[in-house]
């Protein structure tokens, strides 16, 4: 029993010496977030409205590129399906010819 109490006392002392526990950790997180936000503001390439305009333009280009890519993919899929259909029809016709010849 005395060993258990001494272990708890040792753990408590370690927690006390390791940076004030959870409160110290939370303070460190808040301080880090504020420091990071300040640095981001100092090194931002443009004002907010300019950055938003650039992002809108880039998003519009990405949408157009995606639409073009989907259109090309649809065209290719239609071509491949038509080619596969012709191939299948040719195979069915050859099989029908062989069946007629066999009779």
Image (cartoon, helix red, strand yellow):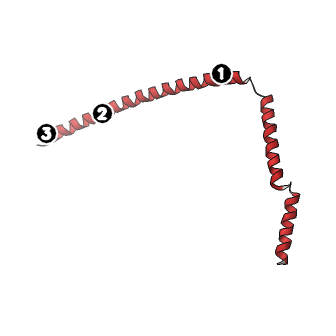
**Which of marks 3 and 1 precedes in the sequence?**
1
Residue under the image location 44 percent in, 29 percent down: 73
Q: Is residue 67 left or right of residue 36?
A: left
| Disc 3: which residue | 100
Query: What residue is shown with label 1?
Result: 53
Numbered circle sitting on residue 85? 2
Q: Residue at horizontal 80%, vertical 43%?
A: 30
Q: Could you tell which of marks 1 and 2 lies nearer the N-terminus?
A: 1
Real-space Cα separation, disc 1 to disc 2, in angstroms:
48 Å
SS class of the residue under badge 1? Answer: helix
68, 63: nearer the viewer:
63
Q: Position of residue 87 (x, y in %)?
A: 29, 34
Residue furthest to the front in view is 23
Mark 1 crowdedness (10 Å alpha carbons): few <14, some 14-19, many ≥20: few
Q: Secondary structure at mark 2?
A: helix
Relative to 61, is 9 on the left or the right? right
């Amino acid at each position: 029993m005395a060993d258990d109490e001494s272990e708890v006392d040792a753990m408590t002392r370690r927690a006390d010496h390791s940076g004030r526990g959870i409160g110290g950790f939370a303070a460190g997180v808040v301080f880090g977030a504020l420091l990071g936000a300040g640095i981001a503001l100092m090194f931002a390439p443009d004002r907010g409205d300019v950055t938003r305009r650039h992002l809108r333009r880039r998003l519009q280009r990405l949408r157009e590129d995606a639409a073009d890519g989907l259109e090309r993919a649809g065209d290719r899929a239609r071509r491949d399906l038509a080619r596969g259909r012709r191939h299948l029809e040719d195979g069915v016709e050859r099989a029908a010819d062989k069946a007629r010849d066999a009779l």
